[in-house]
Image (spheres, coloured by chain):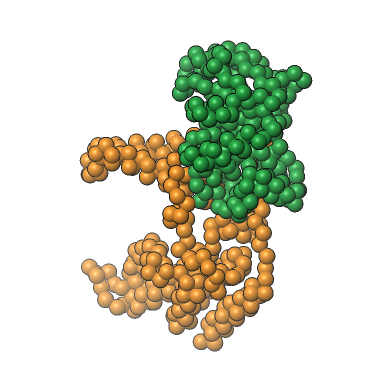
Amino acid sequence: MSSLIELTDIHFAYPACPPVLKGASLRLDGKERVCVVGHNGAGKSTLLHIVVGLLRPSRGRVVAFGQERRIEADFLAVRRLAGLVFQDPDDQLFCPTVAEDVAFGPLNLGKSKDEAMDIVDRVLSSLDLGGFRDRITHKLSGGEKRLVTLAAVLAMEPKVLLLDEPTNALDEDNEARLIEILLSLPQAMIVVSHDTQFRERIGSRAVRLADGEIVPG
Amino acid sequence: MGHVVGSGRPTLLDTGAPEDRTLINEIDPRTRILAAIAFAVVVVSLHDLRILTGALLFGLALMLMARLPTRSTLRRMVTMDSFIVFMLLLLPFTVPGDEMFTVFGFPATWQGLRQAVEIGLKANAIILTLMALVGSVEPVRLGHALYRLKMPEALVYLLMFMVRYVDVLQQEYLRLRVAMKARGFRPGNNRHTYQSLGYLIGMMLVRAVERSERILGAMKCRGFSGGIPLLGDLAYTGSDVYFALGFGGVLAALLALQFLV
């Protein structure tokens, strides 16, 4: 297995819109942290959604974890191995309490309630969020929500993290904390971010999405 | 986004009930739901006005026990009354019986008035009890309790999503309203106002649909397969037994009085 994720010649257009991606190719190897930049609407989020099969390219190949992925059934395994953290934490935290939200993934993977709660406790304490276990998700602050979405994704024990604008609406302290956490994680990552400082701290490689294609940043 | 605002602000979902321990708070939400249902069934089957007044006073007592804020709770009760007030006003004119007075040639009857009073007493006694017992439950715990009471899962999920997102939607609405105000929008009775408010509602709907699609995407990413596991742990305790016995006693007394008179 040479690369974790390999997108080749991806084409994509939203219905009734001009194409966003016109032959984009991207490769993610183990231990890499690739930062993707590009102007608004360049298709950065679209690219991440294509990796986990929430959107299907009209042309091109998605190879993830050593297999080509085409249909919904192929992507079920990808979604477990590649954890996507959404741009707006409110989209992701849909369970009433933090514990339920973090346990949602593990329970879907067939873990028992006790096993799931063990994972919840372990993940939350590793992110220093132990006290949030029984908090109501919609009453968390922006920074807290962001960290909890990360915990919810890490609870699935993914091999790759896909982060969509993770520093949106974070203050300096929370951003510093996020950077510290991300640097301590072993996962390879694809990070979409407008935040130059953040990219410089996190990224091991940068690429630019321009005119629907990936070019070296 | 809404999450920029601090976590201490009041939300649409606040029950108004105190968060510290009260006599009612000690009791498992499932017991409270079942008690409220039993109370409603018993009160509907009563007919004597004096006993119904007693039931209403019992509801008031429960409200005080739950330490709900009196004024806003009674205001909520009056809001419910406004739904039935027209029916109550018309009843004296539609029920045949002994004439009380006439309005434009339509006779109002004592029997009709009695029925209107009876329905008014029943409705208010039940709504007060419902607010005291169930309305003071934190919405998320209410969802868990309904789930454990074997309510259809789809309905419980609907409630849970509502609990989760009503605040997000309200924040979105308020942001749009502020944005309108910032550009000098002042509502009036004119075409421009209705058109702008129409756009506002339309925009909210579109955003809600888009958000729901993003949420579904996020759920799929975490292996969603049709069911949402709920974890809340509820347990019946000794105080539930005492409450059930006491509450059952009151209900039995109400029924017994109805048979005696």
Which residue is rendered at x = 57% and y = 20% of the image?
A: A206
Where in the figure is residue B226, as x and y percent of width and height? 66, 41
Spot occupied by residue B15 in the image (x, y as percentages of width and height): 47, 61
Placement of B106 over or under B61, stated as above or below:
above
The chain painted green is A
Q: Along the line of sight, which residue is nearer the eye, A23 or A176?
A: A176
B51 vs B227, left or right, is: left
Q: Residue furthest bottom?
A: B260
Indicate the quadrant where residue B29 lies.
bottom right
Image point (54%, 44%), residue name: A145
Give the image location of residue A167, x and y in percent: 51, 34
Quadrant into which the N terminus of chain B falls: top left
Residue B138 visible somewhere in the drawing: yes
The tint of chain B in the picture is: orange
From this view, report whether residue B257 is shown above or below residue B68. Answer: below
Left or right of B44 in this view: A70: right
Q: Position of residue A24 (x, y in %)?
A: 58, 15
Q: How many marks?
A: 0
B138 vs B182, nearest the viewer: B182
> What is the quadrant of residue B85 in the picture?
bottom left
Relative horizontal placement of residue A169, taking residue B186 as reference (left or right): right
Q: Residue at x 55, y 74 (%)?
A: B23
